[in-house]
Each structure stands twice: as structure tokens, then as C-alpha cells.
Image (cartoon, coloured by chain):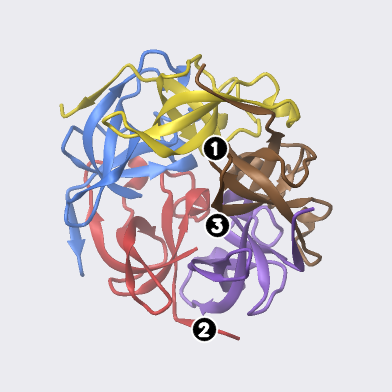
Chain colours: A blue, B yellow, C red, D brown, E purple
């Protein structure tokens, strides 16, 4: 999973049927000091997060392993809202 | 999903049967300010988009989860035409 | 598999059900001289490792091929604790 | 799919049985001005192309979706010979 | 497939059961002039190669398409020992 921050969302009316009703969030990668990095991805939100929140993103076929994304043409999802990060034990 | 802009198309006569009849579009990655970036991909269009349009691209096995691409040797598709991007809430 | 070092962990209460009960570890890539590199990933621990340990990380659909991660929305796991690395024969 | 140019081939006698009889081609990535870029891949040819030809390469599990590569340990194939590229509409 | 050179091996006692008995080889990417590049991967050897040999590596789900790696948490394998590389026809 990749660590990221939700920075916005995408509106798309004309799309594959498997995306209908899905929330498309813009997620930028962040480092461990919370700095926002350049790479970003559009990920389907399956947990209910908001802009500014720190999240974990799953990519690839594992993005289809939730009830909401099963067998859909989706390759990136938000699977968790991060509460805290612990460096060291 | 990756954000991109359609910049052209590819013509290929000699190809695997699973690609017959598919529209092969050239899509360049773009950033959130609409700047065209260097990386590009050839993606099958399953929603009906044109050159110059902003799109979402799905890569990997999820690219085979549409009626048009099911079980085909296709690893990249255009799944949506982007209407707008909202930064912040 | 990628060589990495466990540097911490992630706490996430609000998450996809398939992540419940999973230990989410922060793993930084390392080189063969043990230098910690910048890229990092959040991986589910399936072998029981601790912070500071050298590990192997499996990514993608193969991350779902363990009893603990089968059919879950997980794309990165720690599959082994590295005892030693032998350069040359 | 990635745009590339066939620059040579690979001979390998000792190999996994699933590769027996497959043509292993060296393909370098190219840009839209036909410049050869550094990254290259070894891809199985399923359409019959020659050195110097412009091709499309499919990577990942989709590389196993042809009759010739089904259920084989192959992660990269040449799926098409490119006739022409059209920039703009 | 990626071209690489075997430079060593990894010993790991504590690991997922699906890795038991597998030879974990360190493989560095090489270019076409045989120069060793920085990126490296830990790959399961399914063909029997030794340190110093030039090999082809398969990544992702295709790494599970051999008898020895079927349904195991393995995302990278050595599928062939390279005899020679031919540039041009």
C-alpha cells in the first residue's frame, strides 16, 4: 500500500458502467514527514474519507478485492484512513 | 487510475486477434495544472473520447474488466472522460 | 521480491473489512550495503517481524497468495525475514 | 500498451518449459519522434515482427491472454506491428 | 522479461510456507553492453542458474505460472539462462 493525502476529486459523466456511483478521489503521495510529493493517482474511495486526510492506497488487481469494486475496471482504491504513523518500535 | 490527455491514435493492421476492432489511443500523462508530461501510453478507448480530451486510464488486469476488453491481451484502457477536477473540498 | 527494512508501523481504524486484524508495517527499500533508500511501502506482515529487521516484500497479486491475505485488498506483504545476503557464490 | 522498436533477440536454451518455442525479442521503448529510449524489455513475439519494426508491447497478466502465451510464465508480449501514429485528430 | 545478472543469494529461515525450499537469488538489472545497473530484485530460481550468469526475470502474476511457483506468494522468478543476445537481425 502507498501512503497518500486526499487533495481533491474528479467528476466524470461519460465513463465505463463499472465506475458508475464510485467516488473518484485525487490522492498525492506523501513522505513520512507529511510532505506532499509530485506523483498522484485517481483512486476509488471505499472507506469514506475527505479532502486533507491521510490514506492508504491499494493498486492493481488487489483494488478489486472489496465488495464495492469486485470485477470492476478499477485499479486503485483508498482502503484506509491513517490515524497515525509510528517510526521505530 | 492515471490522469491523461488524448493526443492521437495508433494504426496497426498486423496484430493479435484480441485487438481487432479496438481503438488504440495515444494518451500522455498530465499534471493537475493541465501540463502535458512526457510519459505516454497506448490505451484502448471503451468510452468514446476524442483527441484533446482529458481522460482516466486504467492499467493492468483491471483493464480487462469491461465488456469490450474481457479476456483480451489489453493492459491499458480509457475508462472515463474527465469533466472537471476539484482541488480541495 | 524487494529487499527492505522495517522502520515503523501504521495505525488505521477506519478501513476496508479485509484489512481488519492485519499488521501494517512501514518498509523502506535498502541497497545491498544496507543503506536505507527513499522509497517506502506499507506492507502486511505475515511472518512476524519487528522494527529494524531486514525483510523481503512481495507486491501485486502474489501478495494475496498466503492464508492470511487470500482474496483481500492487500497488494504488499512481508514474506520473509532475511538472515543473510551472500554476494558471489 | 507501450510503444517500442525491435532491436534484436535473445537465445536461451536452459529455460522454463513454458518458454519453449517462443521467440524472445529485445524491444526498446521509443518516443513519438521515433527516438530510441534507454529502457528495454524482452518480449515474446505473437504476431511475427522483425528487427527495426515499431511495435506495441503488452505487459503483466494481459500478456497471457493470447493463444500462444496462455497460462505461461510470460509477462511481456508484442501484440501489434505499428503501421502509423497520428498526432492530433 | 527483464535482463539481469545473478550476483548472489538470500538466506531466510523465517518465511511464509510457500517460500520453503525455494532458491532466492539476487539479480541485478544489466544493459545490453553487460553493464550492471543499480536496480536489483530477489527472484526464485526455477531453471538452475549460478552466480555470474545472465538470466531473464519474469515479474508479477506470471511468476506463478510454473510448476514450482504455482499459487505461491512469489512475484519474481528466473525463467531462463541467456546464451546470447543478438542486436540487429
Question: Could you say which disc has been placed on residue D33 in the image?
Answer: 1
Q: Residue at x 46, y 35 (%)?
A: A64
Do tags 3 and 1 sit on the same chain? no
Residue B47 visible (yes or no): yes
1 or 2: mark nearer the eye: 1
Mark 2: secondary structure:
strand
Confirm or deny contact between disc 1 and disc 2 (CB under 8 A): no
Residue E22 visible (yes or no): no
Estimate how packed mark 2 is, as few (under 14), some (14 to 19) or many (20 or more) residues with alpha carbons within 10 Å.
few
Q: Position of residue D72 (x, y in %)?
A: 72, 49
Question: Could you say which disc has been placed on residue E75 in the image?
Answer: 3
Question: Could you say which disc has been placed on residue C86 in the image?
Answer: 2
**Quadrant housing the N terminus of chain B:** top left
Give left or right: position of D13 versus B67.
right
Q: Residue E27 sits in which quadrant? A: bottom right
Q: Tell me the chain of label 1.
A: D
**Quadrant housing the C terminus of chain B:** top left
Q: Position of residue D84 (x, y in %)?
A: 65, 27
Q: How far, Cα to Cα, is label 1 from label 2?
A: 44 Å
Which residue is situated farthest in the right direction here? D21
Mark 3: secondary structure:
loop
| Residue A68 in the image: above or below residue E49 | above
Q: Position of residue C20 (x, y in %)?
A: 31, 47
Q: Position of residue E4 (x, y in %)?
A: 60, 66
Give left or right: position of A65 versus A31.
right
Looking at the image, how many numbered discs can be counted on the residues? 3
Q: Residue at x 38, y 74 (%)?
A: C54
Observer-nearest residue: B1 or B62? B1
Do tags 2 and 3 sit on the same chain? no
Amino acid at each position: 500500500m502507498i501512503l497518500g493525502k486526499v487533495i481533491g476529486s474528479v467528476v466524470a459523466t461519460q465513463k465505463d458502467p463499472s465506475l458508475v456511483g464510485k467516488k473518484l478521489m485525487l490522492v498525492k503521495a506523501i513522505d513520512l514527514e507529511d510532505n506532499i510529493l509530485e506523483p498522484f493517482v485517481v483512486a476509488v474511495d471505499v472507506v469514506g474519507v475527505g479532502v486533507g486526510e491521510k490514506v492508504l492506497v491499494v493498486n492493481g488487481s488487489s483494488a478489486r478485492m472489496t465488495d464495492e469494486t469486485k470485477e470492476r475496471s478499477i485499479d486503485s482504491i483508498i482502503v484506509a484512513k491513517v490515524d497515525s504513523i509510528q517510526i521505530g518500535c
